[in-house]
Amino acid sequence: MLTVEKKKKYTVEDYMLLEEGAPFQLIENDLITSPSPTPAHQAISYRLVLTLGNFLENNADRGYLAYAPLDVKFDDGNVLQPDIIFIVAERKGELVKDVIEGAPDLIIEILSPSNAYYDLRQKKDVYQKFAVKEYIIVDPIAFNAELYTLANGAFQLHQKVEKTEQLNSVLLPGLSFDLNRIFNF
């Protein structure tokens, strides 16, 4: 087991030596820790997963849906734990191994005071660099959500919605998140 000591650069090998369930992510070769999620965060996560899961059950695409904690290895310097991931069925065999190896098609992050900087900056940059097709950021404090799509190698804001509105996926046409229901905790 790795004892966390200050080091200039961590690798995926260092990360894999951590105790299972340790509250770390490897972001740009730096070990980042955060406290466990709040009850509000978990309630929102549950509703998002439930909505996405119900949509997938009722539609032809039976891709891979998962939620944190689950490692997603982008490269040797980036092993992240997005709140929610989805991989289309055609890519499932290519990416789903002992950890997810490569960029999921859809990532959803729920902001918390302890992680907002990473979700909005560093992790978003990693997701863009590795070509995540759709990135959704849910803000339980402002009661809004933003949906970004990848175009020409960069995220473009496709939709920003408030609590009383619907967030509509581009990747999965017909998938809609009712934010009033998502934020009802």
Image (cartoon, grey):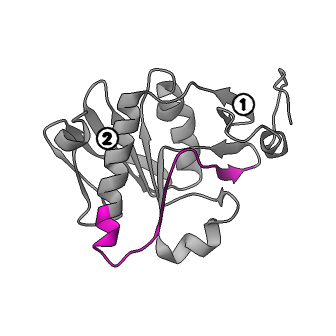
In this view, the mark in front (2 or 1):
1
In which image quadrant can residue 32 be found? Answer: top right
What residue is rendered at 85% in x and 33% in y?
Answer: 2
Q: Name the amino acid type tagged 2.
A: Glu
Look at mark 2 in the image and give the residue it sits on. Answer: 146
Quadrant including the C terminus: top left
Look at the picture and state if 165 lies above or below 122.
below
Count of picture labels? 2
Residue 31: numbered disc: 1
Q: Is residue 137 visible?
A: no
Q: Is residue 106 left or right of residue 104?
A: left
What residue is rendered at 40% in x and 37% in y?
Answer: 42
Look at the picture and state if 157 lies above or below 163.
below
The location of residue 120, given as percent across then percent down, is 47, 32
Crowd tier of the residue under label 2, counting other residues whose Cα lies within 10 Å: few below 14, some 14–19, many 20 or above: some
Q: Name the amino acid type tagged 1.
A: Leu
Q: Nearer the viewer, residue 128 or 31?
A: 31
Crowd tier of the residue under label 1, counting other residues whose Cα lies within 10 Å: few below 14, some 14–19, many 20 or above: many
